[in-house]
Amino acid sequence: MTTDTAYLAANWALIRRRVDDACREAGRDPASVDILPVSKTFGPELVRAAVGLGLRRFGENRVQEIREKSEALADCAIDWVVIGHLQTNKVRDVARLAAEVQSLDRLELADALDRRLQQECRAIDVLVQVKTSSEAAKSGLPPEQLGVFLGALRNHHSLRVRGLMTMATHTGEPAEVRRCFDLLRELRDRSMEQGHDLSRLSMGMSGDFPLAVAAGATEVRIGTAIFGRRAPMNRQ
Ligand SMILES: *Cc1c(COP(=O)(O)O)cnc(C)c1O
């Protein structure tokens, strides 16, 4: 085992155990919560070491990084998951390289991505990112627009809508974080009642995943607790 692999193996085992503990605490089956490793800012060598542990899906927030890493790791059959704010002029690379987009937050983007995917003869899974926090820096669809948006997505045949994603308010106040996660689950439940098949809830990161698991997350997105701290320059 290389140093990188040993380091990642220890981190991976620990975070899986912590997620399992959070599940049991919440009376949930640990098998009902997946971990999406978030490899943003870390180089292809470290991602390759993670592939060595059996990990195949990685979250990234910049299309440019997906492009670079997918070239360096072309032999690895990785599913790249876009979790960051997506500019419409990036859809060409996304349609070519991404297995999934969790940050779908506006119709203009859905239109462009769907059109481009059809040209590539591909379809991908998408989650709708909802803005549950009032922080100006957070992106996402306003909650009150979700019903209309989901309706419009029905004729985007290359986008398979699987669920919702959110980022909670960045605060040490657990009640506010929990409010964000509860809101996402309520929106999901209401949308299901209206006939949308949305089973997935992607919410929770290294610092707040126990609250997300308690609120019903089916997937937590974990960067720091697996790969370590990111350089301050590009911490986002
Ligand atoms: C960076 C990032 C994460 C992971 O954050 P950590 O705190 O490092 O676990 C999760 N979700 C999104 C959207 C991110 O940009």
Image (cartoon, rainbow, N blue to C red):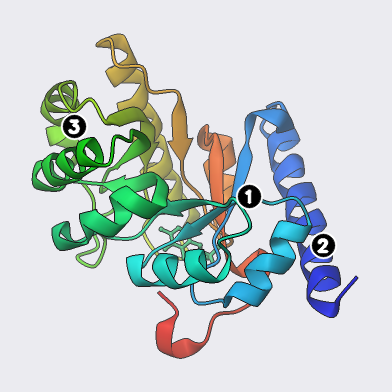
Q: How many marks?
A: 3
**Which residue has dot 3 on it?**
146
Amino acid at pointer 1: Arg
Mark 1 is surrounded, within 10 Å at the Cα level, by few (under 14), some (14 to 19) or many (20 or more) other residues, namely some
> How far separated are the C-alphas under marks 1 and 2?
14 Å
Residue type at tag 2? Ala
Q: Quadrant of residue 31?
A: top right
Quarter of the picture holding the C terminus: bottom left
Location of residue 119 in the rendering, given as x and y in whole percent from the top left corner: 20, 40
Q: Position of residue 142 (x, y in %)?
A: 16, 43
Q: Which residue is mark 2?
A: 9
Tell me what residue is drawn at x 86 percent, y 70 percent: 6
Which residue position holds label 1? Answer: 56
Up-down relation of residue 228 to residue 154 (above or below): below
Mark 3–mark 1 CB contact (< 8 Å): no
Q: Nearer the viewer, residue 34 or 184?
A: 34
Answer left or right for 50 relative to 198: right
Q: Quadrant of the N terminus?
A: bottom right
